[in-house]
Image (cartoon, rainbow, N blue to C red):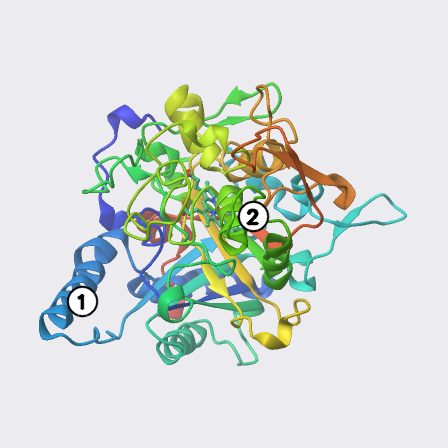
Amino acid sequence: MSSSSLPPLDLKNVQGDILTGGLPKKTETFYFFQIEPAYVRDFRTQLTQLLPLITTTAEVLNEQIPKITQSKKDAAEQGKAPRILEMSGVNIAFTHKGLILMGITDEIGDSAFDAGMLAGAAALGDKGTTSASGEFIPNWVPAFKHDIHGVILITGDRHETVDRKLAQIENIFCVGAHNALIHEVYRTVGDVRPGKEKGHEHFGFMDGISNPAVQDVTTNPFPGQETIPQGIVLLGREGDAPTIGTPPKPVTRPPWALDGSFLTFRYLFQLVPEFNSFLEHNPIPEVPDRELGSELLGARLVGRWKSGAPIDITPTQDDPDLGGTQIETTTSALLFPATRLIKTDALSRRTSNATTSRRIVRAGIAFGPEVTDVEKNGTLYGRGLLFAAYQSNLVNGFQFLQQSWANNTSFPPKKGTPGFDPIIGQAPDGGPRTMSGTNPNNQTTELYLPQEWVVPKGGEYFFSPSIPALKETFALAASKSEL
Ligand code: HEM
């Protein structure tokens, strides 16, 4: 597949969750399934019935988003709250085990995908135990330690809409009947947080702002937003340069991989009361107002204030007018240690294409209840982030970000190295994590991070095929005898 000889990208061919920072949603269900080995052929035949339900990027950009924008505009003109529009979206993606079971065995060209996330959990820094036979078993919920063949993503304006859509999908695959073609391995439901926390993850920070713009897809990039080649996200497009093995050897993707993308899913729990208590007890000392000192520490750990305003543009206090729209516009983020993977952004502008290839498009959603006073002394209820991100290369993308940047005590490799990413960095064996640079007046002061506030409890790598691939390679026409 040579990207130069390809027709231009048709957004009707790309599943809708991939390029736009996620299907529009108030709620999203991730439905992980296994295909019944005895019914693989029937499953592939029934996929034809699912195809009309799949939401494409063209539908998201040309229908769903304009409808939402119009409804908000109308409401503003009438001085009313925007009407909630009934809306849903469906996408599907498969694991390597799922592809093999379906008999789709061409080498796709990504060793992380081929191995699956469970096999790489120790290298990602996830905690667990090693069995007598030397096998590493992460502390994940059991479902993610079993084989998963695929995931169906269903988004909607409310739970009822999603549940109705899911019932329709289960019906296609005869779930509940004795000849069910798939069975559910796990289901998890995310919800946009309520009220003014809308769009914020559970630690309270606005999330999903600094996704890259995609060449010829994002029409109005934000100021400072990097535009990346399509091939950083889509397989087979310009910028996709797959390699496999050590030393890396270039590989050719199979034709059906074109315009598909790899989805990383991580089931991340967040210890919110513990994180808040850490901030409360470690305010930046020079700030006279203790509460603001704590807020500043949080902002310096994340690289942004809770509103989303970048700390290097507004270093001493939050500026909600900048939140949500203002992308990192300078490279000084590197001075703020461990300013999350904003390091990536800063480096990418400073150096070269080498970091552009690390870009991912995030499309996750928060899950779990809001914190109340009952949890003053520590987390009692599970909550966190259903982290979902797309890229054309898992080894260069998510896996590299987690292993080589977030977990790396000496990144970036220069004087005054900050150390761990305080939000998602994982130390081996849960060992001590220290970082420097949180104090603006003394960049070398070390801060001890007593615990990991983000706890991975599962995850998997998936391939989200293009619509033509779903139609022509994954789905099978019913044979004459079945008609
Ligand atoms: C519960 C876990 C996580 C939380 C609470 C979290 C939170 C955030 C927040 C608040 C931002 C800044 C807002 C924005 O740029 O959208 C951000 C940015 C980002 N996060 Fe996360 N995140 C989490 C997990 C992850 C993971 C697992 C990865 C990948 C390994 C990741 C990769 C990124 C990237 C690439 C950016 C954008 C950085 C940039 O280019 O400026 N995040 N995250």
Q: Residue 75 placed where, x, y %?
A: 15, 72
Q: Residue 46 placed where, x, y %?
A: 41, 66
Camera sees residue 236: no
Looking at this view, name the residue that lies furthest to the right: 132
User: Judging from the image, what secondary structure is the residue with disc 1 in?
Assistant: helix
In front here: 244 or 222?
222
Q: Mark 2 points at which residue?
A: 100
The reply to whether the residue tagged 2 has its Cβ within 8 angstroms of ligand 1 is: no
For badge 1, the amino acid type reads Lys
Q: Residue 451 placed where, x, y %?
A: 70, 50
Camera sees residue 32: yes
Looking at this view, name the residue that lies furthest to the front: 288
Relative to 466, does residue 187 appear above or below in the rendering? below
Q: Residue 404 placed where, x, y %?
A: 60, 31
Q: Which of marks 1 and 2 is nearer the N terminus?
A: 1
Q: Are marks 1 and 2 in contact (CB under 8 Å)?
A: no
Mark 1, Cα crowd under 10 Å, few <14 / some 14-19 / many 20+, is some
Residue 286: quadrant of the picture: top right
Q: Name the residue under label 1.
A: 72
Q: What distance separates the C-alpha of mark 1 from that of mark 2?
A: 45 Å
Question: Closer to us: mark 1 or mark 2?
Answer: 1
> Residue at (51%, 66%) from the top-left corner?
367
